[in-house]
Amino acid sequence: MHDEKYYKDIGFMCGLEIHQRLATKEKLFCRCNAMLEKDAQIAEINRRQRAVAGELGKVDTATEFESHRQRSFTYQVFRNTSCLVDADEEPPHELNNEALEVAMKITASFGAKIPDEIEPMRKEVVDGSDPSAFQRTMLIGYSGTLKVGKKEINVPSIFLEEESSGIVSVDANKGVYSLNRFGIPLVEVDTDPEISNPNEAKEAAERIGLMLRLTGNVQRGIGSIRQDVNVSIKEGTRVEIKGFQDLGTMPDIIENEVERQVNLVKIRDMLKKRKAGVSEPFDVTDIFAKTEIKLIRKNISESGKVYALRLKGFEQIIGYEINPGRRLGSEISDYAKLAGVGGIIHSDEDLDAYGFSNKEIMELRQRLGMKPGDAFLLVSGKKDICESAIKYAKTRAELALTGVPGEVRGADSKLLITRFQRPLPGGSRMYPETDTTPVLADRNYYNDLLLDRIDADAILKKLKKEIKNNQLAEQMLWSPQISLYDRIIYVTHADPAVVASILLEKLKELKRSGVDVDSISEEAFVEIFQSYKTGIITKAAMEVIIKSVPKRAAEVAEIIKRHNLKRISGKELENIAANAKGESRQDKITEIMSKYRLTVDGSELLGILDKK
């Protein structure tokens, strides 16, 4: 990892977009169940989407790009978790007031201001993730701040919006999505590009995640929170990286993205010195009519085509490494693959390994009018796919002349790199939602929230006082279990130290041994600790119950009865202690606990023996 000076010298700028699903009963603009419960699929809807001009009469670059791909989309419809609103067959219902209140609570936690009127907007999206080809979104807060260590980072905007559809499968021609996830309330928290290095980006993302969890009103689990990162350098352009699930990989992926951008600037400067350029596509199918290369021969035999580009001045630059195992040719290939081809072939590769003949290469160079220092690339496939692929490849090759293109890229957590997804969207895709009415903000309600806003430092201080173990208190603050901890303490008044140790240590241990602790409901946990607090069970019995308990809390009492886990106490324990055969105190303890380990509390037994 580079030092702080390096990032300052290259003009490193970084900001975050954190998307968090809210734990509301209903969706944002309909009354469907929003908790992603198992549901029966009852239908499928097939659609295509196209880009349209926004309010200012311009078509957004990203939506136009997606529209040209001409993909079809299938949407799975479910009985209880999707409806006509989700399928865009019915106007949206009233805004979910519960979601608005949670969003306001989150907004207050950042000390942000709120608009006088909350205006639902449409954000055009034609990648298939939204059946209506737009996402409903609204600005909830602005001008907030985020504290990261001793530094304050500005939070310019907080949005309340619809979650996209769940991805079932996606390829170059078709996308399949499920509507059970679509429309779940989602909050987006954005920061200004004031993050100074990759490690600080991770710290800021963790801090935002913490503040969202501390509200107690957000969903948990894989996919419920998504972190996007915007990165640029002074001679480049903003690049948005999507899909961070593991924050542990964030610094390395950002570091490699910076390296990619620095190398793309170097490539731009080399191409500028060479006065490089990119030709129009050439149809060179006839040159390879009798080729020995199986894939190309197969494509041609199926009425396919072979297209080529002359890349003036690109020799040894298509093969220039921009990331470990990645070259400029890899970037061009990613664009071409969007059309459905397997990739490209270019002249910086080992052409002999492909099986090209010298005659084919000579004819190709002659047809393209190549000169020393030039390069070429080839694409083969079905005619319509090949035509699209060579256009995409040409676009990316031309972008190399300008340096770093503005793109949306996906985070690859295995290779710790980013991959192209689509061009960076602009402002032309936003316009007012005409099917819903604006909402007047309740300033009195919001001012009360500001007075009682979430303070992580104060919460940590409270946890340390309750748990009486600083390490466990720190873990609890950052744990997704904190809302469950608060509920258990509030309802049962159980010993906070015991609650913390079970939730943070015992559950982790049981999960590693294969126990599905994530399927246990909060109600069941409350019931277990209520049984402990009222003396029905011992602390030792909790492990057996957690291993056995189903999702329904009503079963906890039955499990206690079935496994004979009711606590032995009072006179009954005194009689057991009196009849113990051990001669010494320790012998008696060992004898009794070996037989009644799960049903006798050790401290109570010690008290009885000491009294005796």
Image (tube, grey):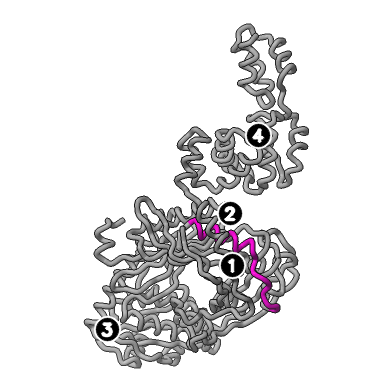
Q: Earlier in the sequence, mark 2 or mark 4?
A: 2
Gap between marks 2 and 3 measured at Cα: 52 Å
Q: Is residue 29 left or right of residue 361?
A: right
Of circles 3 and 1, the one toward us is 1
Gap between marks 3 and 1 measured at Cα: 46 Å
Q: Earlier in the sequence, mark 2 or mark 1?
A: 1
> Which residue, given by chain and number where applicable, does mark 4 sit on?
542
**Farthest top residue?**
583
Q: Is residue 234 above or below residue 429?
A: above
Q: Which residues are magenta?
A: 89-109
Q: Position of residue 502 (x, y in %)?
A: 58, 37
**Residue 337 visible in rendering:** yes
| In magenta stretch: residue 107 | yes
Q: Which mark is residue 163?
A: 1
Q: Earlier in the sequence, mark 2 or mark 3?
A: 2
Q: Which mark is residue 313?
A: 3
> Which residue, given by chain and number where applicable, does mark 2 sit on?
220
Q: Position of residue 485 (x, y in %)?
A: 58, 42
Q: Position of residue 169 (x, y in %)?
A: 60, 70
